[in-house]
Amino acid sequence: VAMSAACVCASTLCYAAGPASIEPSDAKPAPAVQLLDIGSSEDVLPGTTRPRRSVQLSSSVDSRVTGLLVREGDAVKAGDVVAVLDDRVAAAALALAKAEASHVGESAAATARVRRDKHQVERLEKIFANRASNSAELEDARTALALSEADLRSSIERREAAELRAIQAQAACDEQRVRASFDGVVVRRHGEEGAVVQSGDPIFEVVDASSVSVELYLPATAALSARPGASYALALEAP
């Protein structure tokens, strides 16, 4: 990267260069931007810029790439889906788990049996309340109530297990979507549609272009004149 001779930054120090912003009226004034004489006949200085944030977006599972939704140079927002993996198995597991979790009829029937058997026990207990011994009919009713209560607990446990399987299946489906982790620009594509990828294989590289780090190499005289902490304007040119 190059910079005009009138506008430089301190030697080998990194400075942020981002888009200008409009400060509110009550904000503190921005520090004064200074000019630094580089003491060179050259009107440009060699240097490098790099984004402060960059990330390799990769698959978290072994799968096959079924869709690439962005291209190099595209802007993305945090959470945007940039690539889709083969989710057929995960989607089928999710549909099955949701179907199992939605079967409330079994629990409703078990609840109704408990209510019926409990009413029968209460009725017979009133009948035999003043008798020295309970009848076989009452004992049978109590046994039926215990069994129906056990069936209800089992039904509830099965439903809860299905709900947990649905959550697990949803997470597996989510892993088949590769998403941008922050707002940025796609600078490189590593994956190809139809390719088989392993966990950790990069598919896209995204950088945050709103803030970059700049490193310049100044002549010795200019480096001695630069003051740490001071602000200097940068005029960047395309390489």
Image (cartoon, rainbow, N blue to C red):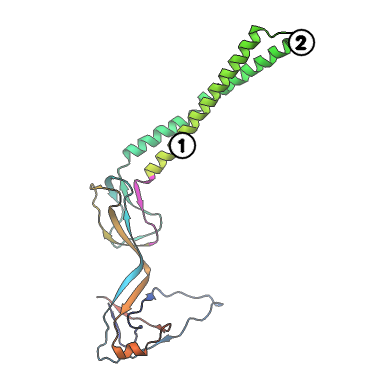
Residue visible at 35% across and 39% down? 90
Disc number placed over residue 42 in the picture, else none: none
Tell me if residue 176 is in the magenta stretch. Answer: yes
Residue visible at 51% across and 81% down? 29
Say above or below: 39 vs 196.
Answer: below
Disc number placed over residue 164 in the picture, else none: 1
For the C terminus, the image quarter is bottom left
Say above or below: 107 vs 135.
Answer: below
How many numbered discs, if any? 2
Residue visible at 40% across and 73% down? 19
Task: Give, as a three-letter code, the residue at label 2.
Answer: Asn
Say above or below: 190 vs 3.
Answer: above
Tell me if residue 78 is in the magenta stretch. Answer: no
For the N terminus, the image quarter is bottom left
Which residue is farthest right?
A: 130
Residue visible at 35% across and 81% down? 234
- Locate residue 129: give its quadrant: top right
Identify the mark nearer the N-term, 1 or 2. Answer: 2
Rendered location of residue 209, percent (x, y): 36, 68
The residue that mark 2 highlights is: 130
Task: Give, as a three-letter code, the residue at label 1.
Answer: Leu
| Nearer to the camera, 99 or 213 | 213
Rendered location of residue 138, percent (x, y): 65, 11
Callout 1 crowding tier (Cα within 10 Å): few <14, some 14–19, many ≥20: some
Q: Which residues are magenta?
A: 174-183
Give SS at disc 1: helix
Q: Would residue 29 appear left or right of 206 to someone viewing this image?
A: right
Q: Magenta span: helix, strand or loop, mainly?
A: loop
Rendered location of residue 198, percent (x, y): 27, 48
Which residue is farthest front?
A: 132
Callout 2 crowding tier (Cα within 10 Å): few <14, some 14–19, many ≥20: few
Cα distance between the residues tagged 1 and 2: 49 Å
